[in-house]
Image (cartoon, helix red, strand yellow):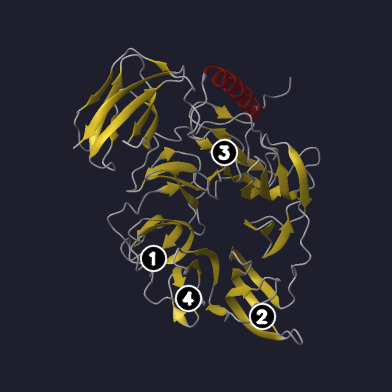
């Protein structure tokens, strides 16, 4: 008798649990939408980015294996709203970031980017292969509305006349609308490193991040800002090393930076992953900057474990990345926090998240090293490199690499069933913390809405006796609604004082 395949047994029993869970639970926000099935096979390298069409189609980039030919990886996969493959592109020419511009796409691949048509053919009216740029280290790029592109990395520039080398180590270069080096923009050079990330601030400045000692002749930290012409903004400065992959901004100009950071003077000897900074680049020590993000495989002392920050409810953020635990809790690459840095694992994403990926080269960590995204229909997509997802209700082994989660526009039936039971809110009026109990059910979903009917706080599967933090709400009246998956709901008025 052959030995038991433990992983096969685990997947088999997980499938049974999934069937039971799917049959017995109504659709609830942030639970797996089983109508969508990822076509990407476990064992692929990664999914790097997604683009969502208004009609529900999804374009994925990465290095992805598909049936029936897993030995021929695809860099672009266009699928319908159910995950059925429509068309693909092989190779690695479109494996990175996807940015739409008009009726075209700019898609990163290898160490550069190219311009594509919506039918996944290259736009050859654009100069996709530039002999005047020799990328030595790939970075990210930003597309302006007029079609100009600014890109980071480490590039050697060549003469237009004889393609001889003009200089080395340029880390910020702009391209015109035809794909040629834009000579009206002064290229900027880095010394002892490269810039790997770029994003545009609302005022037109660019926020860059990388591992460089000098930018345009100035000593800089790993996060820096430049003016639209590429010159350094000297009013902003950071004093630590590492790299940032994503940001989230407060209204007062402070911001969160996700990535991996070293040599932070305020926290000597610590490797940090989520920092809050003031508008001038100083560290805001009132934030829990030492939140411990870890992986069971390794500690990411030389890589960025956090991939993205996304606000999916007012003052509630989801952080994704290449980690398996936060503060000792198993979270599998995805965790929710409030804007003060409080972990909300007991309210959102209460499962073990992404499962590990086993490949011929070994075991990858649970990798959601990209942002969670919201589609036009209100649903959410997560993606990266993982073999299945546990949403807190069940484990779904058939949801690898790309998973669709229900948005907050589902979970309540169109005709809710009123409950005669009383919803108790204590204290009422209340202040920073309240306790909500519903005699008919132990666990239920809780919604708090303001006088305009907007949902200002939502907690899934609230357990009995658990206090609710409402410190982020303004003083005034609110409606508190408890919902259960059988359609029952009960509402009570509450006043914050």
Question: Which of the two marks, 3 or 2, is nearer to us in this view?
Answer: 3
Q: Which residue is mark 3?
A: 377
The answer to whether residue 168 is left or right of residue 333 is: right
Residue at the image point whose x is 69% and y is 42% from the top: 43
Q: According to the image, label 2 marks what residue?
A: 157
At 38% across and 37% down in the image, what residue appears?
A: 454
Distance between the Cα atoms at labels 3 and 2?
Answer: 44 Å
Tell me the SS state at disc 1. Answer: loop
Around disc 2, counting alpha carbons within 10 Å, would you say few (fewer than 14), some (14 to 19), or many (20 or more)?
A: many
- Picture coordinates of residue 242, whole percent (x, y): 46, 64
Q: Are marks 3 and 1 in contact (CB under 8 Å)?
A: no
Q: Which tag is nearer the camera, tag 1 or tag 4?
A: 4
Q: Secondary structure at mark 4?
A: loop
Q: Is residue 363 above or below residue 37?
A: below
Task: Name the residue tied to disc 1.
Answer: 263
User: Callout 3 environment at 10 Å: few (<14), some (14 to 19), or many (20+)?
Assistant: some
* Drawn side of residue 398 relative to residue 329, left or right: right
- Return the disc, 4 or 2, that comes first in the chain's sequence: 2
Which of the two discs, 3 and 4, labels the residue nearer the N terminus? 4
In this rendering, which labeled residue sits more in front, label 4 or label 2?
A: 2
Residues under labels 2 and 1: Cα distance? Answer: 33 Å
Between 152 and 59, the one nearer to me in the picture: 59
């Amino acid at each position: 008798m052959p030995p038991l395949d433990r992983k096969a047994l685990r997947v088999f029993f997980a499938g049974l649990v999934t069937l039971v869970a799917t049959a017995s639970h109504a659709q609830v926000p942030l639970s797996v939408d089983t109508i969508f099935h990822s076509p990407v096979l476990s064992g692929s390298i990664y999914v790097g980015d997604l683009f969502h069409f208004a009609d529900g189609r999804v374009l994925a980039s990465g290095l992805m294996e598909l049936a029936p030919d897993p030995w021929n990886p695809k860099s672009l996969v266009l699928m319908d709203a159910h995950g059925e493959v429509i068309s693909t592109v092989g190779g690695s020419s479109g494996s990175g970031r996807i940015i739409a511009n008009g009726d075209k796409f700019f898609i990163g691949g290898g160490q550069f980017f190219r311009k594509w048509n919506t039918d996944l053919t290259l736009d050859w009216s654009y100069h996709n292969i530039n002999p005047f740029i020799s990328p030595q280290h790939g970075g990210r790029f930003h597309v302006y509305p007029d079609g100009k592109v600014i890109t980071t990395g480490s590039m050697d520039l060549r003469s237009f006349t004889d393609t001889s080398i003009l200089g080395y180590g340029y880390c910020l270069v702009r391209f015109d609308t035809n794909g040629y080096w834009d000579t009206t923009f002064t290229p900027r050079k880095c010394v002892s490193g490269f810039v790997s990330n770029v994003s545009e601030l609302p005022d037109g400045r660019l926020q860059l991040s990388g591992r460089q000692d000098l930018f345009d002749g100035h000593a800089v930290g790993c996060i820096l800002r430049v003016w639209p012409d590429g010159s350094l903004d000297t009013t902003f400065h950071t004093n630590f090393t590492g790299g940032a992959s994503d940001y989230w901004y407060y209204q007062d100009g402070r911001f969160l930076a996700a990535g991996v950071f070293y040599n932070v003077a305020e926290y000597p000897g610590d490797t940090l992953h989520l920092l809050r900074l003031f508008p001038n680049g100083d560290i805001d020590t009132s934030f829990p900057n030492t939140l411990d993000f870890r992986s069971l495989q390794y500690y990411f002392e030389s890589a960025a474990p956090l991939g993205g920050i996304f606000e999916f409810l007012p003052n509630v953020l989801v952080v994704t990345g290449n980690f398996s635990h936060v503060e000792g809790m198993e979270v599998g690459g995805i965790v929710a926090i409030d804007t003060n840095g409080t972990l909300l694992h007991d309210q959102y994403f209460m499962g073990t998240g992404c499962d590990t990926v086993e490949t011929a080269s070994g075991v990858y960590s649970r990798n959601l090293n990209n942002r969670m995204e919201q589609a036009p229909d209100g649903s959410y997509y997560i993606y990266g490199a993982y073999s299945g997802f546990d949403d807190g209700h069940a484990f779904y082994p058939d949801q690898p690499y790309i998973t669709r989660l229900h948005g907050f526009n589902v979970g309540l039936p169109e005709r809710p069933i009123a409950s005669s039971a009383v919803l108790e809110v204590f204290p009422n009026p209340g202040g920073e913390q309240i306790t909500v109990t519903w005699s008919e059910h132990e666990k239920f979903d809780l919604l708090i809405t303001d006088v305009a009917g907007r949902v200002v706080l939502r907690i899934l599967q609230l357990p009995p006796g658990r206090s609710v933090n409402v410190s982020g709400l303004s003083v005034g009246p609110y409606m508190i609604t408890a919902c259960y998956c059988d359609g029952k709901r009960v509402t009570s008025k509450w006043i914050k004082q």
